[in-house]
């Protein structure tokens, strides 16, 4: 079914739901609303850049894991893995909908200190109690299974080969958006420039093109620009853009098997990517970036990334960089966890922000959860209330320690 071009202007002056941001989080919410038989409202998705050229979704490494330190994030990713594996059926079974490629070689965390080894043990116990396949590996066990590592100084590893790895996130995003539109969700290329609210409710938004749009519910899904959208409604959230570097390289020597997504104590992560390899890290000076700052630090490859690769995998002494890019995390400086749902005093302003690099893998569960909040006023499938806005006011952090 061919879809019409996306217009710049909305068709109506009022919608039951307006979503600010049409990347993977906004599109997951939109699709879940459209697929819920109990929701019969109108939805407008406002996306400022129809190319998504600078969206966090576009620059993702497309990975998913259950190796988190909090139960809610483990359960979110368990649903995400099930959603990915049954993508066509989840979206309605149309044979035009592709199955998603999902490479399940797992994440491998490496500990080089007793304190981090104890942390991995604690996390593995939690993950296993929730049904995850995480296993602890001694250096000898790691060497037997992955002989290409140099394990000097490594005390323990944590690896989960079940429902962890990388998947075709771009296709997931494309079809969530496509099916949302097919189901009647309206997307426009525009921007929200103002939000008008009374004491406890959002009334309407103003678009860059000048229209004023009334809405029953406003959802902030604007990624690294989330704090900007919140401020329009007189609200503050601790979310800022932070640069993350990704490099793609090829190796002269064959490792003999897939390289798990390895989190090295140096802070560099690496994984197989088909016939190539992908790796990345944050900048050494990890501070807030401007929305349009995608500057690559070329020295970090020579001074940090390549030395870490070659130290951990000696075969990576002989590699050639073939691509790189810079993306933004929508980084929650408060506790590195998503901020979901309404603040206590504005019931119809819902947040879906601050994923700190986990947005793509958490999009299925968050889309389902926010659609339930809109439709029923509560979470019904998975309780996400631990990630609610209220913790920003109480100061009770729901810290996620496993942030790469």
Image (spheres, helix red, strand yellow):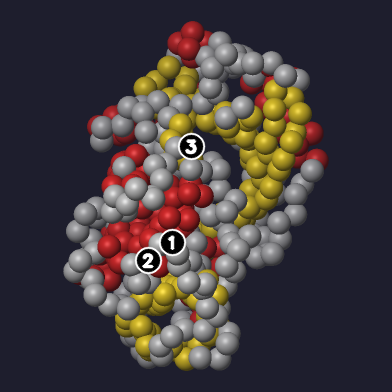
The reply to whether residue 395 is in sight is no
In this rendering, the label closer to the viewer, 1 or 2: 2
The reply to whether residue 208 is in sight is yes
Image location (x, y in percent) of residue 391: 36, 62
Label 1 sits on residue: 177
Q: Residue at x 54, y 58 (%)?
A: 330
Label 2 sits on residue: 182
Helix, strand or loop at disc 2?
helix
Q: Nearer the viewer, residue 270 or 273?
A: 273
The answer to whether residue 163 is above or below residue 152 is: below
Label 3 sits on residue: 166
**How many marks overall?**
3
Disc 3 or 1, which lies upstream in sequence? 3
Image location (x, y in percent) of residue 225: 56, 68
Q: Residue at x 43, y 55 (%)?
A: 175
Task: Calculate the distance from the C-alpha at mark 3 to the C-alpha at mark 2.
Answer: 27 Å
Q: Residues within 10 Å of mark 3 (few under 14, many from 20)?
A: many
């Amino acid at each position: 079914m061919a879809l019409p071009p996306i217009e710049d202007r909305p068709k109506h002056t009022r919608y039951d739901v307006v979503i600010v941001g049409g990347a993977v989080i906004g599109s997951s919410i939109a699709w879940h609303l459209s697929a819920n038989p109990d929701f019969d409202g109108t939805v407008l998705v406002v996306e400022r850049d129809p190319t998504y050229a600078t969206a966090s979704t576009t620059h993702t490494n497309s990975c998913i894991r259950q190796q988190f330190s909090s139960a809610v994030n483990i359960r979110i990713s368990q649903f995400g893995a099930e959603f990915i594996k049954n993508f066509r059926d989840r979206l309605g079974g149309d044979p035009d909908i592709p199955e998603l490629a999902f490479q399940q070689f797992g994440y491998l965390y490496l500990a080089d200190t007793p304190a981090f080894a104890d942390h991995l043990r604690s996390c593995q116990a939690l993950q296993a109690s929730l049904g995850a396949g995480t296993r602890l590996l001694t250096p000898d066990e790691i060497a037997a299974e992955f002989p290409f590592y140099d394990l000097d100084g490594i005390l323990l590893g944590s690896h989960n080969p079940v429902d962890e790895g990388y998947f075709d996130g771009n296709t997931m995003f494309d079809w969530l958006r496509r099916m949302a539109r097919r189901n009647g969700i309206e997307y426009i290329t525009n921007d929200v420039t103002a939000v008008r609210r009374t004491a406890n409710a959002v009334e309407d938004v103003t678009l860059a093109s000048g229209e004023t749009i009334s809405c029953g519910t406003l959802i902030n899904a604007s990624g690294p620009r989330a704090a900007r959208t919140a401020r329009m409604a007189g609200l503050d959230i601790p979310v800022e853009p932070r640069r993350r570097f990704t490099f793609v390289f090829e190796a002269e020597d064959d490792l003999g098997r897939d390289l798990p997504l390895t989190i090295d104590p140096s802070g560099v992560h690496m994984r197989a990517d088909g016939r190539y390899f992908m790796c990345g890290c944050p900048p050494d000076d990890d501070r807030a970036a401007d929305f349009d700052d995608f500057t690559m630090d070329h020295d970090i490859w020579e001074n940090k990334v390549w030395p870490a690769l070659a130290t951990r995998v000696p075969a990576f002494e002989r590699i050639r960089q073939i691509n790189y890019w810079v993306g933004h995390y929508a980084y929650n400086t408060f506790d590195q966890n998503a901020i979901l749902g309404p603040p206590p005093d504005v019931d119809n302003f819902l947040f879906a922000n601050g994923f700190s690099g986990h947005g793509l893998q958490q999009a299925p569960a968050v889309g389902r959860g926010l659609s339930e909040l809109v439709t029923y006023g509560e979470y019904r499938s998975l309780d996400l209330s631990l990630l609610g806005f209220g913790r920003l006011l109480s100061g009770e952090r729901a810290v996620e320690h496993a942030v790469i």
